Amino acid sequence: MALHLIKLSVGPASMADLAARQASQPAQPVHVTRTLPKRHREIAGKGSIYWVIRGSLCCRQAIVALEPLTGEDGIPRCRIVLAPPLVPVVPRPCRPFQGWRYLAPGDAPADLGAGLGGDVAEMPEKLRRELAALGLL
């Protein structure tokens, strides 16, 4: 069974901002974090990273690989190699936290459009967030 990660996206104000930031990377999108998850074998190639943007868990990306990396400062880190498309999910509020957290498959939000109708996936992200905050989505 796949295991997922949940991570705050610091800087981008929307999914479009996150996509633009990743598109500016020279190769496949990556995210570098401080530690390699102990359960990395359950995640790499099977799980996704769920992004929290502006207090709302709003999208995910498949995790292709988790690679140990040593920074220029000599500190060990982890490079998370991601599949390019950002997949919108049913938004839900999320409190701030540091680092990443594991996310069990049963706790992961559904992809937008999966049983919700195509119209929801076509809504502007800001509207989806507002509807989710009101408990209407």
Image: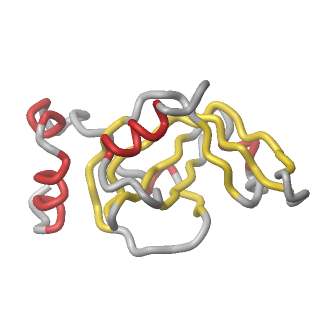
Instruction: Residue at 78% x, 40% y: name it.
Output: 67
In the rendered image, is residue 127 in sight? Answer: yes
Tag count = 0
**Quadrant placement of the N terminus:** top right
Colouring method of the image: secondary structure
| Position in image of residue 57 (x %, y %) | 36, 57
Q: Position of residue 91 (x, y in %)?
A: 27, 54
Q: Residue 110 occupies which quadrant of the picture?
A: top left
User: Residue 100 at x, y = what percent?
Assistant: 59, 62
Evaluate whether residue 1 shows in this view: no
Q: Which residue is located at x 11 percent, y 68 percent?
A: 134
Q: Is residue 78 above or below residue 63?
A: below
Q: Nearer the viewer, residue 60 or 46?
A: 60
Whether residue 97 sits left or right of residue 76 in the image: it is left
Q: Residue at x 15, y 51 (%)?
A: 128
Give the answer, above or below, for where 92 lies relative to 60.
below
- Quadrant containing the C terminus is bottom left
Report the side of 107 relative to 98 (left or right).
Answer: left
Residue at the farthest top position:
27
Q: Tell me: 70 left or right of 52.
A: right
Residue in view at x 58 percent, y 63 percent: 101
Position of residue 102 measured from the top left corner of the image (x, y, whole percent)? 59, 59
Residue at the outermost right position? 74
Using the image, determine if residue 27 lies above or below residue 135. above
